[in-house]
Each structure stands twice: as C-alpha cells, then as structure tokens.
Amino acid sequence: METLSVNAHVHTPYSFSAFTDISQIFRMAVEESIAVLGINDFFVTDGYEPFYQEAIKTGVFPLFNIEFISLLKAEQKQNIRVNDPNNPGRCYFSGKGLAYPFSLDSHSTGQLKAIIAESQVQVREMIEKANTWFRQVNAGILLDYENIRRNYAKELVRERHLAKAIRIAVFERYAADDDRMALFSRIFKGIGPKSRLSDYPGLENEIRSTLLKAGGKAFVEENDNTFMSLEDVAEIIIRAGGIPCYPVLLDDKNGDYTEYERDMENLRQDLTGKKIGCIELIPGRNDAGHLERFVRFFHEREFIVLLGTEHNTPDMIPLTCDTRGKQPLSTEMKRISYEGACVVAAHQYCRAKGEKGFVDDLGFPQLTLRKSFVLLGNAVIHHYRQTINLK
C-alpha cells in the first residue's frame, strides 16, 4: 500500500490560524503534496463547507474534525497535568471523522452553544480589562469586541485574536519604530518587547504572555462553566458521528512528560477505560526518538494514531509534519500516520452510507477492525483522488 502524505490536524480562521483563509491551506497542501488534510477547529464546524469545497477543487481528501477543551476535575484536584503543561486537569480533546454535513441533536447543540457563549463572556471581560490598562498608560488605543470579531475572526473570538488586534493597533497608532517600541514598553509595564517589530508572531506571543496570561493586566481566569466534562465532550463527538480522540502532548524540550502521560501503559489503560481508541500528536514539538517509541507502543496495541501541525499560532510553518528541530518523520511514522487517516476516511465513508463506523452504538472503538478499515479507507481515498482528477 502506497503511503500518502497526511496532516490530520489544522486550525482555520474559523477558530484561530496562521492562515488568512481556507484556500491558502489547500494551496500549500498541493505545493507540499499533502494528500489528506483534516480541519480541526476549536468548538465550531463553520469551516466545514468551505473546507469541503476547496478539497473538491484540489483533490485533497478531507477529514472533518473538531477540538474541545474539557476539564478532568479529579486530576485537577490532584494537581495532575493532562495535556496542558500549565493547567492541571485541563484536557484538550478532539473528535475525528464527524458527519458532513454537520448536525447535532438539540441537547448537544445547547451544550455547545453554552460553552461558546461562556468563552465569549471571558473574552469581553479581557477586552474591558485591557482597555482600562490602556487608559492608565495613555496608550491611545481601545479594543472593541465586534470590530475584532469582524476584522480578525469569523465568529469565535479567541485570546490570540486579541493579541493580533493589539499588535495591529500599536502599529496603526504610530508609524515610527521608536514610538511603537515605547508604546509596547508602556503596555508591558516598562519592559520593552524582546521580539523585533518585524516579528509579528513573536510580538503577538509576547502580548499574550505579558498582558493576557496569568499575572497580566488583562488576564481573566476561566471558570468551570467554560469547560465541559470529558464524558460530555466524548458524547457530543459520538452523537455528531465522530471518533473520540485524545491529543497527546508528549515530551517537552527537556524530555519531560505530564503526570498523566508519563507512563504509557497506565495511559493506555485509562484511555481504554474511557472508551478512547484514537490518539493524535503534533510531532513538531516532540523529539523524534520519544515520538517513535510512543507511537509504536500504541500502534502495536491497535490504536488509531494521527499526526498534524495545528497551525493555531501566528507562525506560518509548512503543512508537512516533522519532529522537533525540523527533523523529518521516519518512513514508519509516515506509514502509521497514513493508516490512521485511512481509518478515519473509512469511518466517514461508512457513516455517510448509514452504516456503523469505527465506533459502535455504545461509543466503544472497534480496535479489531482497524486493519480492515485501513484497507477500506485507502481504497476510498484513492477512488476520491482518481475521480477528482478525471473531472
């Protein structure tokens, strides 16, 4: 079986992204010979339709995914970090291969709308606190929620949109670099930015860490209403026709793991107990040796393994997955990544036909079907690509 290049996890401007629009993602995918691409926005599926349309235009096979932020309260109480290195108990969680067109029952829709609304309350409070601080330091700039949503977001305004809006406001306030640096210094409580003014991603990251994160003048702590339980998130994913998937943080630059991920066998048992048989990684933040050892362990135990790049920061990096230090993936990692994408493709195909996919009616992943789903998904992807190319 030919191994095709996959990126199963990219964010679009419908949540926050390095990309200006979805067509840019697919232009890059074609340039880099990416055959399978997965949309993976936070909380929303608004990008599904344009994502599908661009996939049809380019012949890139689309995977329809979503991402949530949940809270494991038991782990939080025990100060156990899950896959957020800074916030014990907080757990990013994805759904893979959701139904397209997307649909949910009224109960799940209500849950999702409530979480989104709560997140926007927090954002509005951050804007208010930022404006109070700007007045105190005579910054001469003010943020407006509707303007930010209209100019820098689609519907959902996130923290990174605020950082971008602040960076642009400073640049529009002053044309001279010295004046811009002086204004940043006032905003940063007397300490100038470390990034060059030409380094937009660096400046926006500094704005987030200095102003919007804990200890910053515009920081607003999230309350428990901002998060659903992992069980509720998984239920929404299953009701939307998807496969629950745990995003693995893995090693940091010092080779350290979170408490939750430190022991692979314990992690496998816990995920299995939660009816999770799919994991994903962003290998660009991991050491190649750590990545291969971890991926091999779970692949040998019939888990689906997916790889992606996220692209949910201002930094524009290639769509092709690599490991820390821009080291390319090994042939084995590429094969396992493609096999995982084939399973999701097969799941989407079966669900579109009204058949059961990789997850049964009770939400359990059918791990014994993985190999047959790899073969089916490979056939589906190749048929799709051949059909598009004939048009």
Image: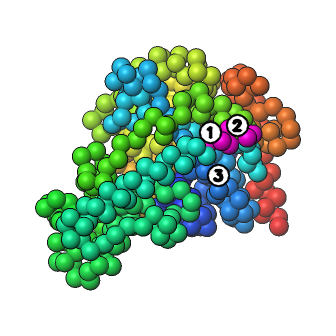
Please give the label number shown on residue 45: 3
Q: Which residue is mark 2?
A: 107
Q: Residue at x 86, y 38 (%)?
A: 354
- The image quadrant of residue 85 is top left
Left or right position of 39 against 90: right
Q: CA distance from mark 2 to mark 1?
A: 6 Å
Q: Amino acid at mark 2?
A: His
* Mark 1 Cα shell of 10 Å, populated few (<14), some (14-19), many (≥20): some
Q: Position of residue 94 (x, y in %)?
A: 57, 39
Residue 362, located in which quarter of the rendered image?
top right
Give the label on residue 314, or none: none
User: In what element is the residue under mark 1?
Assistant: helix
Q: Residue furthest bottom?
A: 175
Q: Amino acid at mark 3?
A: Thr
Foreground residue among 303 and 123: 123
Q: Are marks 2 and 1 in contact (CB under 8 Å)?
A: yes
Marker disc for residue 111: 1
- Nearer the observer, disc 2 or disc 3? 2
Structural distance between the alpha carbons of marks 2 and 3: 17 Å
Q: What segment is highlighted magenta in the picture? A: 105-112
Q: Amino acid at mark 1?
A: Gln
Instruction: Please tell me whether residue 95 is drawn above or below residue 302 in the rendered image.
Output: below
